[in-house]
């Protein structure tokens, strides 16, 4: 393959067809900006949903007379229950200190500690929390005599799981739709600019050019237009990030907190996707015009 | 050079492009293909560049059986043909020079080869001053000369011209025919499809006439065998008399 020749052909085509090339570039730019804004938003949403889900747990309250030997035995029994990831112990004293710090006035009125020893049982996955709940209270009675009660947050848990599931699915669907829309939009723009040049392709075939001899300049052109559009989009996103988001992130933890995609990774994804989609779009759209 | 044996082409049931055509054209012949619109002239041309395949029959060009050439080999086959069209089919985004050079670039011609051959051919066709013009800046006759230069730059053994003078005035047409004749005199087989009866009468070359897809006439008229220079040729073409000066 004679790359310099194909490169010259591609740049010539872009110069001579400035308007269609520009519209393809603008399409790539706009879709990539939208994608670039949306990917972090979707990720932040999913991250927030996941962090809510990770807080779903079962609290096991011991009886007030439970000894430390009871605590040790119950902890072993809890860890033996299927789907339990960990069982974190919180003594009466720790619970009291924690609660009184949150609500000092109410706790100042109390003369003794009404709080029991507590185990915070974490499931291996949030969906299994209800299974654990029923395993801890077989037949409506606690597993061990030393267990006073098991928190029964069935309704709350179910709601949290449903809502976060919905959020995750919606985010995934929106991502897929948006990606699909970008690909179609870019492919269509390229197709239009190729359609204007179909006669040229026909002539090339008549003088004996092979399919790939014709195709390479178009693929390179698509790649260059895609990469340029993506670079511009990345520039816009970068400026937005530095000018708007970074100052806010210092004051507003929500923006900084969720684990979203890192900016360099986002840049790589957008650049790769932009160039690849445009190059593929050019190469494939050309197929029907090559049948001469 | 070209051999059609019982070639038929049906575009759709009842839509006959060519009907049992059999003829042969020798190396270095100059042959006219005449007939009214829809008689099958263009079908013959499209079959020869393997844009379409015959429904039945066999076509041989320069020893190749066209049915044996696979889709992927078509570009390589076409490099043995020079093709000239009524609508010129030039690349609008390229200069005159680049249009002619493209035919060489396609075959992998080196830059040195291109720098030698292209200016030579454009000089031959009288376009030396128009090298860097774009096709839309040229007259019809000039554009057709560019397309002839492109068709001949590879020195193909066969040049096909489909209505090369269809869009041109009579004087320009004579220039174009003169150019094709000149190519023919280098030993290249030339096949010209046309409906310009006056032109055909004056040229007095072999004529194949088609009517509704059938060959209805195949004759070598008048001074067919006589060898004349392109200057004599042009003079005779411009003279108002149909009869040759020697008779």
Image (tube, coloured by chain):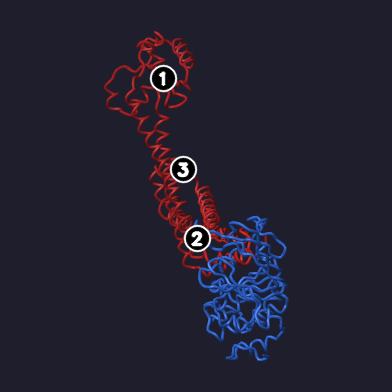
Chain colours: A red, B blue
- Judged from this view, the residue extending furthest toward the top is A145
Q: Secondary structure at mark 1?
A: helix
Q: Residue at x 68, y 85 (%)?
A: B230
> For the C terminus of chain A, which image quadrant?
bottom right
Q: Is residue A51 above or below residue A66?
A: below
Q: CA distance from mark 3 to mark 2?
A: 65 Å
Answer with the quarter of the image where residue A163 lies: top left
> Chain letter of disc 2?
B
The foreground one among B232 and A71 is: B232
Residue B62 in percent (x, y) is at: 71, 65
Q: Is residue B13 above or below residue A55?
A: below
Q: CA distance from mark 1 to mark 2?
A: 75 Å
Packing grade of label 3 (10 A; few <14, some 14-19, many >=20) is: some
Is residue B98 at least partly visible in the picture? no
Q: Are marks 3 and 2 on the same chain?
A: no
For the residues bearing labels 1 and 2, Cβ distance under 8 angstroms: no
> For the N terminus of chain A, which image quadrant?
bottom right
């Amino acid at each position: 393959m004679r790359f310099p020749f194909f490169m010259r052909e591609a740049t010539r085509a872009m110069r001579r067809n400035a308007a269609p090339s520009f519209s393809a570039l603008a399409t790539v730019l706009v879709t990539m900006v939208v994608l670039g804004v949306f990917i972090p938003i979707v990720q932040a949403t999913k991250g927030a949903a996941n962090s809510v889900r990770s807080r779903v747990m079962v609290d096991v309250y011991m009886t007030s007379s439970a000894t430390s030997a009871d605590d040790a035995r119950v902890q072993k029994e809890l860890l033996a229950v299927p789907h339990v990831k960990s069982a974190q112990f919180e003594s009466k004293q720790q619970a009291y200190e924690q609660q009184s710090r949150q609500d000092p006035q109410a706790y100042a009125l109390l003369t003794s500690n009404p709080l029991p020893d507590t185990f915070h049982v974490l499931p291996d996955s949030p969906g299994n929390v209800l299974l654990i709940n029923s395993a801890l209270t077989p037949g409506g009675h606690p597993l061990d005599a030393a267990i006073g009660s098991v928190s029964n947050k069935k309704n709350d848990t179910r709601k949290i799981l449903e809502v976060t599931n919905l959020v995750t699915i919606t985010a995934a669907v929106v991502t897929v739709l948006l990606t699909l829309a970008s690909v179609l939009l870019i492919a269509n723009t390229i197709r239009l600019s190729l359609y204007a040049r179909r006669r040229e392709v026909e002539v090339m075939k008549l003088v004996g050019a092979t399919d790939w001899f014709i195709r390479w300049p178009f693929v390179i052109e698509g790649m260059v237009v895609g990469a340029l559009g993506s670079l511009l989009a990345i520039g816009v996103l970068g400026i937005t990030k530095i000018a708007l988001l970074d100052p806010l992130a210092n004051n507003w933890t929500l923006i900084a907190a969720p684990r979203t995609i890192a900016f360099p990774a986002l840049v790589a994804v957008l650049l790769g996707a932009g160039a690849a989609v445009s190059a593929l779009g050019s190469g494939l759209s050309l197929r029907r015009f090559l049948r001469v | 050079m070209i051999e059609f044996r019982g070639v038929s082409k049906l575009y759709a049931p009842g839509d006959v492009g060519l009907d049992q055509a059999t003829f042969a054209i020798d190396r270095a012949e100059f042959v006219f293909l005449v007939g009214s619109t829809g008689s099958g002239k263009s079908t013959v041309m499209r079959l020869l560049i393997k844009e379409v395949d015959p429904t039945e029959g066999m076509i041989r060009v320069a020893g190749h059986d066209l049915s044996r050439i696979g889709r992927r080999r078509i570009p390589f086959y076409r490099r043995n043909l020079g093709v000239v069209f009524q609508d010129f089919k030039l690349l609008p985004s390229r200069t005159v020079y680049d249009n002619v050079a493209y035919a060489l670039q396609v075959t992998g011609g080196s830059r040195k080869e291109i720098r030698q051959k292209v200016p030579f051919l454009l000089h031959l066709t009288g376009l030396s001053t128009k090298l860097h013009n774009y096709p839309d800046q040229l007259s019809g006759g000039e554009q057709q000369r560019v397309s002839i230069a492109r068709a001949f730059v590879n020195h193909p053994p066969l040049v096909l011209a489909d209505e090369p003078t269809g869009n041109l005035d009579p004087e320009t047409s004579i220039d174009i025919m003169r150019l094709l004749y000149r190519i023919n005199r280098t030993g290249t087989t030339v096949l010209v499809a046309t409906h310009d009866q006056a032109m055909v009468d004056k040229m007095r070359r072999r004529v194949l006439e088609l009517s509704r897809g059938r060959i209805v006439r195949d004759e070598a008229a008048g001074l067919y065998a006589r060898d004349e220079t392109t200057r004599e040729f042009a003079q005779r073409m411009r003279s108002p008399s149909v009869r040759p000066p020697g008779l």
